[in-house]
Image (tube, rainbow, N blue to C red):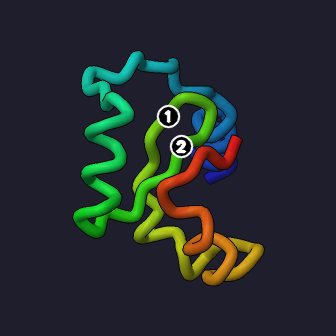
C-alpha cells in the first residue's frame, strides 16, 4: 500500500511536456467566432474557451464574462 502511494505521488509531480498547438486562429476568425456566440479570450497568445470555467472563476462569473473577446494577458 505504501508503495502504491509513493508511486502515485511521483506520478503527480511529473510535468507533462508542452505540445505546440496544431490549430491557429487569426484575429478575424477570433472576432467572428466571438460574434457567433463562442466565449473566447486571449491569454498569452493562446485562445481559450472559457464557457466551462465561468462558474469556477475566483473573481466571479460577471468578471470573466466582461472579458469575453478580449486579451486578458
Task: Give the residue drawn at x 61%, y 72%.
Answer: 66
The residue sitting at the right extreme is 59
Q: Does residue 63 sit above or below 13 in this rendering?
A: below
Left or right: residue 7 compared with residue 16: right
Q: How many marks?
A: 2
Residue 44, given in percent of the width and then of the height, sits at: 62, 32
Q: Which residue is drawn at 60% across and 63% down?
A: 67
Task: Tell me the SS state at disc 2.
Answer: strand
For this rendering, which residue is in front, 20 or 33? 33
| Mark linked to residue 46 | 1
Q: Which mark is residue 9?
A: none
Q: Which element type, helix, strand or loop, lies under badge 1?
A: strand
Q: How crowded is mark 2: few (under 14 residues within 10 Å), some or many (20 or more)?
A: some
The residue beneath circle 2 is 42
Where is residue 1 shown, x and y percent of the image? 61, 53
Left or right of 19 on screen, residue 7: right
Is 37 on the left-hand or right-hand side of 9? left
Between the C-alphas of marks 1 and 2, the distance is 5 Å
Q: Residue at x 33, y 29 (%)?
A: 26
Of 5 and 12, the residue lying toward us: 12
Q: Residue at 43% of width from left, 70% of height from top? A: 52
Quadrant of residue 57 within the rendered picture: bottom right
Residue 72 rendering spot, x and y as whole percentages: 66, 48
Q: In this view, does 24 lie to the left or right of 14?
A: left
- Verify CB contact (< 8 Å) between mark 1 and mark 2: yes
Where does the C terminus fall, quadrant-wise? top right
Q: Is residue 25 above or below residue 70?
A: above
Amino acid at each position: 500500500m505504501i508503495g502504491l502511494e509513493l508511486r502515485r505521488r511521483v506520478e503527480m509531480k511529473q510535468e507533462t511536456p508542452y505540445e505546440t498547438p496544431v490549430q491557429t486562429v487569426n484575429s478575424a476568425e477570433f472576432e467572428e467566432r466571438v460574434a457567433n456566440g463562442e466565449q473566447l479570450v486571449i491569454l498569452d497568445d493562446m485562445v481559450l474557451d472559457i464557457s466551462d470555467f465561468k462558474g469556477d472563476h475566483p473573481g466571479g462569473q460577471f468578471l470573466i464574462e466582461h472579458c469575453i473577446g478580449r486579451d486578458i494577458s
